[in-house]
Image (cartoon, rainbow, N blue to C red):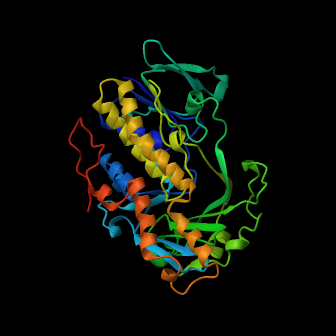
Amino acid sequence: MKFLIAGAGIGGLTAALSLHSVGMRDVRVLEAVPEIRPLGAGVNLLPNAVRELAALELAENLAARGADLTELGYYNHLGQEIWREPRGRAGGSRWPQLALHRGALQTALADSVRARLGNTAITTDARVTGFTPLPGGGVEVSVAHRAGDRPTERIRADVLVGADGLRSAVRQTLYPQEGEPSFNGTAVWRGVTRSAPFLGGRAMVVMGDGRWKAVVYPLAVHPDADGLVPVNWAVSRTVPEGLPSPDAAPAAGDDGFPAAVAGWRCGDLRMAALVADSEAVASFPMLDRDPVPRWSFGAVTLLGDAAHAMAPMGSNATTQAVLDARSLAHALATHDDPITALAAYDRDRRPRMNRLQLLNRAKGPEVVIDLVHERAPDGFGRVEDVVSADRLAQVAGAYARAAGFDVPSVNAPSPYGSPNRPRTAVRER
């Protein structure tokens, strides 16, 4: 059986490795860019994703490239604690929560794909532009190339996986009337700064004032010789009403950034130093997609952002792409007919991802920051006087269960354990 995967992002590469793990060998990943480079900023792998990557014998490699986070805290803009909880192993999970640079994660996955499936398993400068179902089963995939004036290539496959991102050509072929992604009125600035460790060196901080929000976490635990570690930060705010289009979202220096957050601090974390010392600041609008009623159509399915692009609340997008990939491979390994397998994958993943997309549009667990700001805009003496501990715990717990990273779910055996071979022993706690 021949598999084509459109997109060599986190989801597409994990799908290739997952298919290999269940005995599939004819797997090819098609990537639009001429060269895969370690671009982007930080990502979080929640413990349920780390469990799945451990089953692919990747967890220890990735842990060496990032930071094992032990706590997450929500704070107001004055640095007053709203809610703080242990994360990963500190919170009782057998698996850590890992923060690492997206480029480091993508590079590690790509290297593993080439090592396990061969150097030709990833083809760059190969942009999937559409597909045609074949009468006898399978698909014919159209692939465009930029270099050397090469004509459009047509490749036949038994299964096509659209893991080609927010503006997926595979999804556009399935939903030609959908149009552009949804703009939720929020602009984002992101950067990575070399900084002294803060709050013990393994903490993730989310703080805000109802309009502006900052998310900060380290990408390494052990400082270099200069005493510094790379720290990922993202600042967002709702842009003024009447913004003509998402492309008009403000660039760094406009609309109050970075001055609006320059005075924010949380313990020994100083936002002014982070945003001032960043080598490069990226600015972009926050986009997502509406949930759809179906991912799988015959021999074609969607995965990752192509299936469920969501607002970046709760650090979930990368994690869910990993889980998609594992679910897809498990379905293909446990069903003889690929069309039946893709339908089973759809039933397993789509309903919960549709729900998670809507939860993230409603700000996910980070809604507690807005709630507290509405009730105590100038700060508080005790957070319990503003919102009850039970209410805060309910918000955090409900979101964790919806996303599948609550401790009981994480510590249970993976639902996607390989049916074709004994699961390799991996290090857990």
Q: In the drawing, does residue 59 fall left or right of residue 219?
A: left
Q: Nearer the viewer, residue 77 or 62?
A: 77
Which residue is rendered at x = 33% and y = 66% of the image?
Answer: 89
Query: In front here: 163 or 33?
Result: 163
Q: Decide: is 113 above or below 69.
A: above
Question: Residue 205 in the image: x percent, y percent?
Answer: 52, 70
Answer whether residue 114 is visible to the viewer in this image: no
Marks counted in the figure total 0
Q: Position of residue 203 (x, y in %)?
A: 46, 71
Q: Is residue 217 left or right of residue 26?
A: right
Question: Residue at (67%, 67%) from the top-left corner?
Answer: 211
In the foreground, 140 or 358: 358
> Residue 86, how many percent across, how many down?
39, 71
Residue 363 in view here: yes
* Furthest-top residue in this view: 135
On the image, which quarter does residue 242 sit in?
bottom right
- Please tell me which residue is depicted at 38% across the width and 52% down the height of the picture: 49
Q: Residue 60 falls in which quadrant of the image?
A: bottom left
Q: Residue furthest left?
A: 422
- Where the N terminus falls, by quadrant? top left
* Image location of residue 237, percent across then percent down: 67, 63
Task: Report the quarter where the C terminus lies.
Answer: bottom left
Residue 120 appears in which quarter of the rendering?
top left
In the image, 197: left or right of 78?
Answer: left
Where is 90 relative to 329, above or below?
A: below
